[in-house]
Amino acid sequence: MYQKKTVENVLVLILDLACMAVSLGIGFWIRYQRLFGISQNGEQQWLLYFVLLIYMAAGWFMDFYRHFFRRGLFEEFKQVLKAEAVVWILVVSLLYVMHRAGDLSRLVLGYTLLIDTALMYVMRLLFKQIMLKGYRASRYSSRLLLVAEADGAEQVIANITRYNEWYRQIVGIVLPEDGPPDFVGEVPVVADMKGMMDYVIRNDVDEVFFTGPDIVRDPRLEDWIGELGQMGVLAYVNIDAFDLPYTGKKTLGRVGKYAVVTFARNLFSDRQLALKRTMDILGSLVGMVILGIVTLFVAPAIKLDSPGPVFFGQTRMGKNGRRFTCYKFRSMYVDAEERKKELMAQNEMKGLMFKMEEDPRITRVGRFLRRTSMDELPQFWNILRGEMSLVGTRPPTVDEFEHYEAKHKGRLSMTPGLTGLWQISGRSDIKDFEEVCRLDMEYIDNWSISKDIKILFATVKIVIKGRGSC
């Protein structure tokens, strides 16, 4: 995905600028025993900003980070030397033209060159390892399911792996033949064509890549893409499939070395998602302060009202089926999960969700917490960890998720939220799970930062009016 390339370029640029700043500071310290040559008048401090500005401009025009994750050790060292040479030639030349060449000591230049070359090279290698082995194996990476023909599957996997995409991991492969092998290389074979959609529904899959002439020409491909779009899962198909009929959005992209057409219900830029995540982090930090204050008063009340822990953790399903522990203030008796089976006949919701207006499992303090929505405050910790968002769809329980169809899983195509369109649309009055799904998909299909802000303000208004019960 080209937007991911932009993100990686920005991250490496920030890393390089930090290395340059540290190296220049050390160079000045060795020469003058003063940080950046600062005396009482600070006459050389401007050189730091000047050099960093030149580095940013040179990196933009010279494309220092082309194929960054595909470069080997020696190639990376050459690229570091190239960057150092270009930047410092520009710096020295511009200082000469500005008649300020005397501001930069030759010893400072020499020290900085040596230190920065070594530091930048080591930090780039460490950054690659962190992203390729850390980020790619984390819950935040993109899970890719490969649908390929048996004869070429191993070669496809090798080609994708060779490109060292830090944001994507292959979680499984689907082969068309009956009785397929257990593994292709190190990638497990998880299903055949008949079981493919069921696997996507039940597991955390973000992307599906269709490759191979027979698969691309398969008459079922249009239906598969339609189902994946309904689930909010990205579908990648060989470039020849661009004219395939599809009601969602299409764009050109890349998976490893392969040019593909991306089919998706909605496509969000990395800039949009970064802004949403920034808003989540800032909001969750404020929320954690509120949580700390409220806990001082709520915790004793919960403990006095009924025996059991203050906080309740339950496994919920996050984005595209990732499991996480969702936290709340405990508002029910400790045997609530066991008693739920006895109450299923009194479920007031039509469909896969459970809801009772007068649920006997809720404690006296719990009713107050739910009425004020204070029981949800611990989820600011989930938001800070990236498992939830301030605004999204509510995360289902494991039991609910196991009964999902393709049309239901689409509501998990975005990170679940503390609040959402359903919550501000009279959630206490909505008794049909299909209506909940409709509202969730309406939110996903029309998502924007401005819409999130409107939902947040509407949520605050509802909570103040005391209509925040679950």
Image: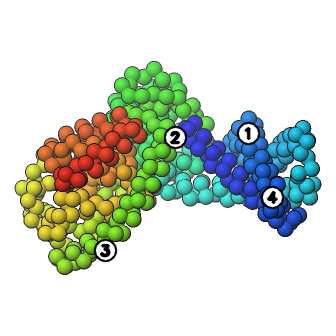
Relative placement, left or right, of 153 versus 459 is right
Which residue bears the numbered disc 3? Answer: 296
Question: SS at mark 4?
Answer: loop
Q: Secondary structure at mark 1?
A: helix
Foreground disc of the pair 1, 4 = 4
Q: Secondary structure at mark 3?
A: helix
Label 2 or label 3, whichever lies nearer to me, is 3
For residue 346, what is the image quadrant? bottom left
Q: Nearer the viewer, residue 376 or 442?
A: 376
Residue at 38% across / 25% down in the picture? 246
Q: Which residue is mark 4?
A: 41
Q: CA distance from mark 1 to mark 2?
A: 21 Å
Q: Quadrant of residue 308?
A: bottom left
Q: Which residue is mark 2?
A: 271
Three-letter residue code for mark 4: Asn
Seen at 88% across and 52% down, the residue is 104
* Location of residue 179 with respect to 250 vertically, above or below: below
The answer to whether residue 94 is seen in the rendering is yes
Image depth: mark 4 or mark 2 in front: 4
- The 10 Å Cα crowd at callout 2, few under 14, some 14 to 19, many 20 or more, is few
* Residue at which label 1 appears: 57
Which corner quadrant of the image does residue 296 belong to?
bottom left
- Of 150 and 325, which appears nearest the observer? 325
Give the Cα distance between marks 2 and 3.
Answer: 38 Å
Q: Amino acid at mark 3?
A: Leu
Whether residue 143 is visible: no
Question: Mark 4 or mark 3, which is nearer the start of the sequence?
Answer: 4
Residue 109 screen position, x and y as percent: 88, 54
Residue depth check, mark 1 versus mark 2: number of the one nearer the observer: 1
